[in-house]
Amino acid sequence: MIFLFLANVLSAQIGLGIGTYIPQGIFHVDPRQNTSLSVDSTKTDDFVVDFSGNVGVGTLTPQAKLDINAGRIAIRDGSEGQGKILISDAEGKGTWSAAGDNGKTGLWSLTGNLTYLNNDGLKLLQGTASLPENEIGLQIDPVNSSSNIIVPAGLYLILVELRLINTNEYGKMEIHLGSGQTLNNKMYEIYYRVNLKGSAFMHYFPQNSYVHMGVNYFPYNTNNLYTQMPIYDPPPFNAVPFEMHLRFIKLNY
């Protein structure tokens, strides 16, 4: 039943009510025909357009152009999907989009025992690989799982940790690109003494890329400056336990 009545005599505002004798706006629908102004639970099915043009669903006093006070909303345009978020364009038109991955992380770890001789030079670091954290799609290389990881394309902040357990080593760590195990495409290097930690750099991978690492430890040499450093343990190293961690933090730009 439709009711037309004078909502406010003083301001001559007329409301149209469907299912209600006392419309609370210019247009008011009460499907269950049970609304009591003093009982909020009776308003959850109501739809109202107030005299300011605000639309309320589940409320008789909308506080915005669209005010939904009960239930959830569904926006279906074909782009919706699990985990997506609603994104606006420059004109305020919305569409569903995959949630951004800025700040998501992945952690690649290698552990094992390192044997390093005085004449080894730059040596491939190999061990047992794991991915304790992986929000960004890192993959352990199925062919060279003991040394290589596959990093998805994108820009990353990369944090490096490496230590030889119970050893005061001095040397250099390098990170290389390439699907094999050769160390001929260096993307980063750092010299360190005893427990490399806190080193960080940014790198952009234009495509999914293979990454592996090499180490180089130095014997005593009276002609080099590092012999003036506090006492360290020179090679050879025989099956020294090690831990290596590379943390990748995704950056959007």
Image (cartoon, helix red, strand yellow):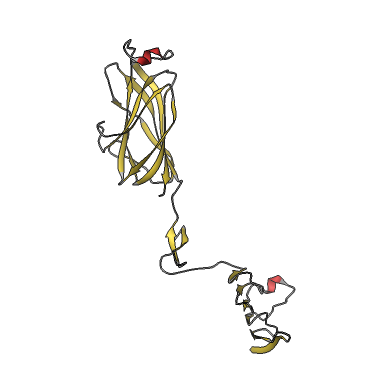
Image location of residue 164, percent across then percent down? 41, 22
Identify the residue at the far right of this view.
Answer: 38
Image location of residue 188, percent across then percent down? 33, 33
Image quarter hosting the N terminus: bottom right
Give the camera-side residue of 9 and 62. 9
Give the camera-side residue of 65 and 162. 65
Give the camera-side residue of 66 and 124. 66
| On screen, residue 131 above or below 54 | above
For this view, does 230 lie left or right of residue 140? Answer: right
Instruction: Please tell me which residue is depicted at 31% across the width and 11% down the height of the picture.
Output: 223
Instruction: Please tell me which residue is depicted at 45% across the width and 69% down the height of the picture.
Output: 76
Q: How many marks?
A: 0
Instruction: Please tell me which residue is depicted at 41% across the width and 15% down the height of the picture.
Output: 229
Question: Which image quadrant is residue 39 in?
Answer: bottom right
For this view, does 209 lie left or right of residue 247? Answer: left
Q: Is residue 147 visible?
A: no
| On screen, residue 203 above or below 110 | below
Question: Which image quadrant is residue 177 in?
Answer: top left
Q: Is residue 193 visible?
A: yes
Identify the residue at the far top of this view.
Answer: 222
Instruction: Please tell me which residue is depicted at 38% across the width and 26% down the height of the picture.
Output: 112
Image location of residue 133, percent across then percent down? 44, 41
